Amino acid sequence: MKTILVVDDDAEIRGHLLDLLQGEGYGCESAGSVKEALAFCRQRDFDVILLDHLMPGGTGIDALAELRRALPKAKIIMITAFATVENAIEAIRKGAADYLSKPFKVPELLTTIRKVLEEAKFEDGIRCLAIDQTLSALASPIRRNILKLLHQGEQVRLMEITRALGIDDHTKVVFHLRILKEAGVIEQHEDKSYLLTREGLRVMDCLKTLEQILSE
Amino acid sequence: MKTILVVDDDAEIRGHLLDLLQGEGYGCESAGSVKEALAFCRQRDFDVILLDHLMPGGTGIDALAELRRALPKAKIIMITAFATVENAIEAIRKGAADYLSKPFKVPELLTTIRKVLEEAKFEDGIRCLAIDQTLSALASPIRRNILKLLHQGEQVRLMEITRALGIDDHTKVVFHLRILKEAGVIEQHEDKSYLLTREGLRVMDCLKTLEQILSE
DNA sequence: CGAAGATGTGAAGTATTCTTCACATCTTCC
DNA sequence: GGAAGATGTGAAGAATACTTCACATCTTCG
């Protein structure tokens, strides 16, 4: 069941939305303040957060950043009474998934929710795919050695890698380089030499941490 | 070439040892104080550290801890003029690889160095094996899902995992659980339920970092 | 006790990944 | 220009990893 957190200071609106959304089969909670919302987010996960733009003690825009930090995977829909383009742009820039202006019609809200949930599903799929590929890439000692070499050497050419690892068949190295390239941890310079991507660099940090964990 | 750092406040002894070890084909540096030694360790790596027990400004025992933190992979051999069992035990407890008492004969020193280098090679092999196993374990989505389940649920039983993942054949889950168990990230309670090991918990942290990296 | 479910083993088959080899193209350097 | 080396592709075979199935044992509960 998908879960939604409604954040609005107006108790009546909260009640309406809760009834409506629960009727649609969503799991719902509501919070009357940003503080309360953050407390909820620390306890449990939500798929969607409906966030009113005008909250007592600061705009919802400030809350947006905090909520996103607390639940990076949650999709946040901003709701505002006074819609301006500027507000909308700012909200989207700060990471809101969508933007609705009051008064909105119920079907409009529901389609918006369905839309962001679809997006979430898609992104989750992508993420899973990416981590799968990255971890598969890291699972081979040969590939980890290649990465270590690139980590030290900055830019290294195919035959340098091949010889450094003491491999006779260079096509074997090509095979593993391709896998690393497809995983996005290495890339190829115009002059054909290989180097770590920014992502690859950070993956190496992670690998180092893992090595430390495993060596107690 | 294997490298050795000699830490002793007596310049004459340092000179002797340096000549001797360089003659044996080791790459050597020497430090007259713990501070100097730490400075070296920050710059570069050593395979072995020869550490005199009695250093001005504190015993070598204190230095031992600091040096080990600076270079976790270096093997430290403590050397002392007044050998006592207590000193030796304390040194080993604090992580010294071996213990020599002055005056020692040259062959004795050399065999000790060779011995700890052999140990290091062995441990390095073990470490490689461990990281290989761990990463292979993480490379399968099914196994990562199992880990996530255990991470949330603390203790979970086989059929709970099987059903939660929507798998019909429980022996498939058994297969993956065995791999996770062999990798040391999960263990089995007496009542047969599975849970993360301490190591597994830390590996999950690492995995979370990786996920964040890959979702930018 | 005995049926139903939980846990697990081992073997056989399937799918994937890895290696090897034959060959193609493109540089580099004399 | 052409020999030598660097880089790469694609296919076939070897090796591993994964799945499935048949079956064994051990709990649990009526």
Image (tube, coloured by chain):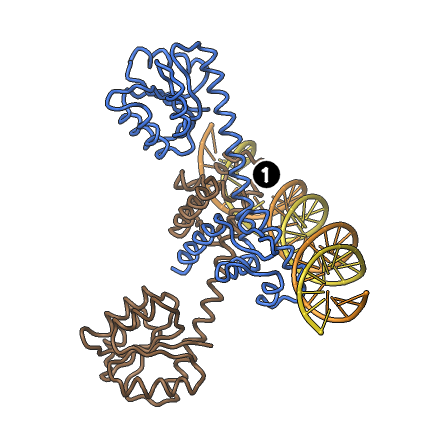
Chain colours: A blue, B brown, C yellow, D orange
Q: Is residue A209 left or right of residue B50?
A: right
Picture quadrant where residue A194 is located: bottom right
| Chain containing the residue with disc 1 | B
Pointer 1 residue: B169
Against B183, residue B50 (above or below) is below
Judging depth in this view, the residue of B52 and A116 nearest the camera is A116
Structural crowding at the residue carrying mark 1, measured as other residues with C-alpha within 10 Å and reported as few (<14), some (14–19) or many (≥20): few
Q: Position of residue B133 (x, y in %)?
A: 51, 56
Q: Position of residue A10 (x, y in %)?
A: 29, 14
Q: Quadrant of the C terminus of chain A?
A: bottom left
Q: Secondary structure at mark 1?
A: loop
Against B189, residue A42 (above or below) is above
- The amino acid sitting under disc 1 is Asp
Judging depth in this view, the residue of A159 and B34 nearest the camera is A159
Q: Residue at x 38, y 75 (%)?
A: B48
Q: Position of residue B141 (x, y in %)?
A: 54, 42
Judging depth in this view, the residue of B84 and B160 nearest the camera is B84
Q: Is residue A215 left or right of residue A162?
A: left
